[in-house]
Image (cartoon, rainbow, N blue to C red):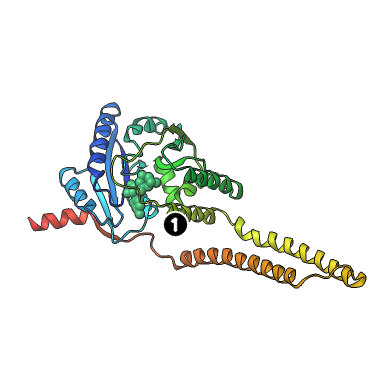
Amino acid sequence: MKLLSIVVPCYNEQEVLPMFYEEITRVTDQMKKDFPELDFEFLFINDGSKDRTLEIFHELADKDSRVRYISFSRNFGKESGMYAGLQNAKGDFVVVMDADLQHPPAFLPEMYSYVRNGEYDCATTRRTSRKGESKIRSWFAMKFYKIMNKISQTEIVDGAQDFRFMTRQMVDSILEMTEYNRFSKGIFSWVGFKVKYMPYENVERPAGTTSWSFWGLFKYSLEGIMAFSTAPLALSIFLAILTGCASLVMYILAIVGACAEVFNVPLLLIIATVLLVGAFNLGCTGILGMYLGKTYMEVKKRPVYIVGETEETYRQRKAAKN
Ligand code: UDP
Ligand code: MG
């Protein structure tokens, strides 16, 4: 028998969770018929939800023994949720997917067909269009992938998602990356392996709301760039050469001007130059500071998440009560 772990990070998903559970059990029941060698476990992660998400986990754990869950002590972010899921999944295969049905469970049989015979190590979906997304957002997303792929050796495919069906081998490789600042899109790609991209049209959430604001996405993209590229650090060297050359030209002009009394560099120009160089300086220090901050967090070696309760402690508690 082969075990497939279905890892689902959830943050305030009370509206869609029942729908998700219904759909995932429908798909897995069918898969059980088509691939009798498969067993399933559902590993839900409660990422510090403030709504009824955890209670729904209790209800699911009561009625379905395949349901496992990990509940965090507070909100740690989706990256931590995925990490906890991968760390605790017991499966020979692991799939990570969103709870909001934007990663349609109907893809699972096809994904499994690519991975089961070792033809691929990972099957994932790839958005072919950005329909239903604002123009500005699409533009920034496009630019992000362009910049990212230019300055980093880790290629990140435009439209790639966190909906990943992976072999145990790939999951173990991902777990070897124990960094605190986790950027999964990069991590998935960094570990390599043979990946099957399955094109698909984006679907809207049937209920609930996305927890990503534009600002949140922007910060996340900076996170990605810093996690997988040190090119911004080299920017200061480029600027140093640029300003160095410019100042050399000015010195020459000033000397020539003083000798021939042709130029009289006005005060404003001097101030502007000083300000410009100062701005470059501050900017570079800022970039340096951002990386230093990341390094500082990394050096602390803090856990990526903290467990509040799991389905095991819940079941024990219930058994002790009865
Ligand atoms: N999520 C999470 N922790 C967070 C934010 C989101 O576990 O802090 C989960 C969320 O419940 C969902 C998935 O991550 O299952 C994707 O979130 P969302 O739908 O808000 O993002 P989007 O699809 O808009 O990228
Ligand atoms: Mg979503």
Ligand 1 within 8 Å of the CB at mark 1 = no
Q: Residue at x 47, y 56 (%)?
A: 219
Residue 205 in the figure: left or right of residue 19: right
Q: Residue at x 45, y 36 (%)?
A: 126
Q: Which residue is mark 1?
A: 178
Q: Position of residue 10 (x, y in %)?
A: 30, 50
Residue 84 in the figure: left or right of residue 22: right
Q: Position of residue 120 (x, y in %)?
A: 45, 34
Q: Position of residue 174 (x, y in %)?
A: 44, 49
Quadrant placement of the C terminus: bottom left
Quadrant housing residue 200: top left
Quadrant housing residue 111: top left
Return the residue found at the far right: 260
Q: Using a 10 Å C-alpha cutoff, classify the residue at mark 1 as few (fewer than 14 neighbours), some (14 to 19) or many (20 or more).
A: few
Q: Position of residue 255 (x, y in %)?
A: 87, 71
Q: Residue at x 49, y 52 (%)?
A: 221
Q: Nearer the viewer, residue 95 or 156?
A: 156
Quadrant placement of the N terminus: top left
Return the residue found at the far left: 322
Q: Residue at x 52, y 41 (%)?
A: 157
| Amino acid type at mark 1 | Thr
- Give the number of marks: 1
Residue 317 in the figure: left or right of residue 170: left
Q: Nearer the viewer, residue 246 or 319?
A: 246
Q: Is residue 85 visible?
A: no
| Position of 19 relative to 245 (above/below) | above
Q: Is residue 291 visible?
A: yes
| Position of 27 relative to 72 (above/below) | above
Q: Nearer the viewer, residue 184 or 239?
A: 239
Secondary structure beneath label 1:
loop
